[in-house]
Image (tube, rainbow, N blue to C red):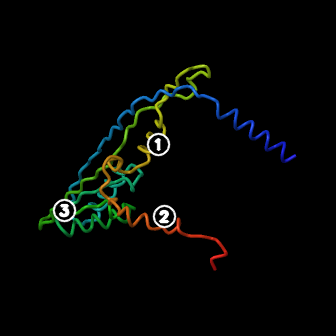
Amino acid sequence: MTFRVKVHLVALTASLSGCASPPVHVEPSTPILIRQQTSVLILESLRASELQRLRIFLARASSGRPDALHLLISGSPPLSAEAVHQAKQMGIDASNIQLFNQHEGHLARIESIVYAASPSVCPSFSSTLPNDEFVDQPMGCSTRHNLAVMVNDPRDLFNNQVIKASNGERAAIPVAKYRTFTTDKSEE
């Protein structure tokens, strides 16, 4: 019985290897448009009403996605520190908060930035007929679309400054060690 199965598998493999698929037409990828939504709040004091105004501003600016909100804070150090504290309490990551231009004064400027990617709409897969010679689907369209929608800062798709280049020789050491590893019991 196992011989018969092996013969069928060999015959199936041989018949499939001769199959030719129709040519695939690859359309050039459409660009991903990135929109930057910016809003600004001027914080005037540490009073409860001002802090409430700050929390409402951050909630509206994030649109329920505090992980996607980027803050640029400048002005009075005490007001800036309180703005950072409130932002962290609301779930905004410290790496998304930048302090700059700190100076003595009575105001703090909080600029919120949210990036939104607008990828092109992918064509329907149900539009092609089985007898068509070409598949007019842009290859990878849904992957590009899903990736653009998922990221918090779509600029990372084009020029990510956070990830540094690595040393290729160092990265190849585990591969070299794996290739020289033997499991032959006779060497022991």
Quadrant position of the C terminus in the picture = bottom right
The image shows residue 68 at horizontal and vertical percentages of 37, 53
Outermost front residue: 186
Q: Amino acid at mark 2?
A: Val
Q: Is residue 133 left or right of residue 186?
A: left
Please tell me how crowded label 2 is: few (under 14), some (14-19), or many (20+) other residues with Cα within 10 Å: few
Instruction: Name which of mark 1 and mark 3 comes first in the sequence.
Output: 3
Q: Are marks 2 and 3 in contact (CB under 8 Å)?
A: no
Q: CA distance from mark 1 to mark 3?
A: 34 Å
The image shows residue 161 at horizontal and vertical percentages of 29, 56
Q: Which residue corresponds to the image point at 84% horizontal and 46% vertical from the top-left?
A: 3
Please tell me the numbered disc located at residue 174: none
Please tell me the numbered disc located at residue 146: 1
Q: Which residue corresponds to the image point at 48% horizontal and 66% vertical from the top-left?
A: 176
Residue of label 2: 175
Q: Nearer the viewer, mark 1 or mark 3?
A: 1
Please tell me how crowded label 1 is: few (under 14), some (14-19), or many (20+) other residues with Cα within 10 Å: few
Outermost bottom residue: 188
Q: Secondary structure at mark 3?
A: strand
Q: Is residue 169 left or right of residue 74?
A: right
Please tell me the numbered disc located at residue 100: 3
Q: Amino acid at mark 1?
A: Asn
The image shows residue 59 at horizontal and vertical percentages of 36, 54
Q: Nearer the viewer, residue 90 or 92?
A: 92
Q: CA distance from mark 2 to mark 3?
A: 45 Å
Q: Nearer the viewer, mark 2 or mark 3?
A: 2
| Vertical relation: 183 (above or below) 114 | below
Q: Nearer the viewer, residue 94 or 53?
A: 94
The image shows residue 49 at horizontal and vertical percentages of 28, 61
Q: Amino acid at mark 3?
A: Phe
